Image (cartoon, rainbow, N blue to C red):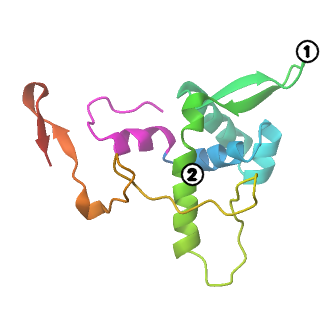
């Protein structure tokens, strides 16, 4: 699960690491408090070998780490690292997009709420450095040019 170091696109590099369905669902479940191999397997309904492969790849990518389930325990829990924790906005953005576009009005679905007040998490939107919402048309990607210079495109 290595990224292509010749790819200057951060989206492509991120997808190389965590872009498959199972890896993202494992990360989602880890945010929901799942820590044990058997709980991941039961919740996701995936084979032991597939789950083992994905967990190992997420460990190698530094998204998850293992820790003993308890003092003297021989089993390990899988917990998000700091790198893994920073995937939260990505999971929320995918959730919100799915809620908006993939459910019929009134169709039952889970809701992501803030624990402190029970209110739904506000819609995520890209913002500029001053906090103003930015539309895609108002942005540009600046790609590296020859000899370290930058060129729009």
Magenta range? 1-18
What residue sits 62% from the left and 35% below the top?
Answer: 53
Residue 54 lies in quadrant: top right
Q: How crowded is mark 2: few (under 14 residues within 10 Å), some or many (20 or more)?
A: some
Q: Which of marks 1 and 2 is nearer the N terminus?
A: 1
Q: Is residue 57 visible?
A: no
Q: Residue furthest top?
A: 72
In the image, residue 151 sits, relative to residue 147, either above or below, namely below
Residue 46's disc number: none
Residue 1: percent from left, percent from top = 48, 33
Count of residue discs: 2
Q: In this image, 96 relative to 149: left or right?
A: right
Q: In this image, 79 relative to 38: left or right?
A: left
What residue sits 72% from the left and 31% below the top?
Answer: 78
Residue 72's disc number: 1
Q: Is residue 40 visible?
A: yes
Question: Which residue position is annotated with label 2?
Answer: 91
Q: How crowded is mark 1: few (under 14 residues within 10 Å), some or many (20 or more)?
A: few
For numbered disc 1, what is the local secondary structure?
loop
Is residue 14 magenta-colored?
A: yes
Residue 118: percent from left, percent from top = 76, 60
């Amino acid at each position: 699960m290595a990224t292509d170091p010749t790819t200057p696109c951060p989206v492509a590099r991120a997808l190389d690491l965590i872009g498959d369905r199972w890896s993202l669902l494992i990360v989602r479940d880890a945010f929901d408090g799942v820590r044990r191999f058997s709980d991941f397997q039961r919740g996701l309904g995936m084979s032991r070998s597939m789950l083992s492969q994905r967990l190992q790849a997420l460990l190698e990518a530094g998204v998850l780490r293992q820790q003993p389930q308890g003092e003297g325990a021989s089993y390990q829990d899988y917990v998000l690292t700091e790198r893994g924790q920073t995937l939260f906005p990505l999971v929320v953005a995918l959730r919100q997009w799915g809620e908006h576009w993939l459910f019929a009005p009134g169709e039952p679905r889970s809701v992501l709420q803030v624990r402190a007040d029970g209110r739904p998490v506000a819609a995520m939107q890209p913002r500029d450095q001053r906090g103003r919402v930015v539309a895609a048309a108002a942005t540009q990607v600046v790609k590296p040019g020859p000899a370290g210079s930058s060129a729009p495109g």
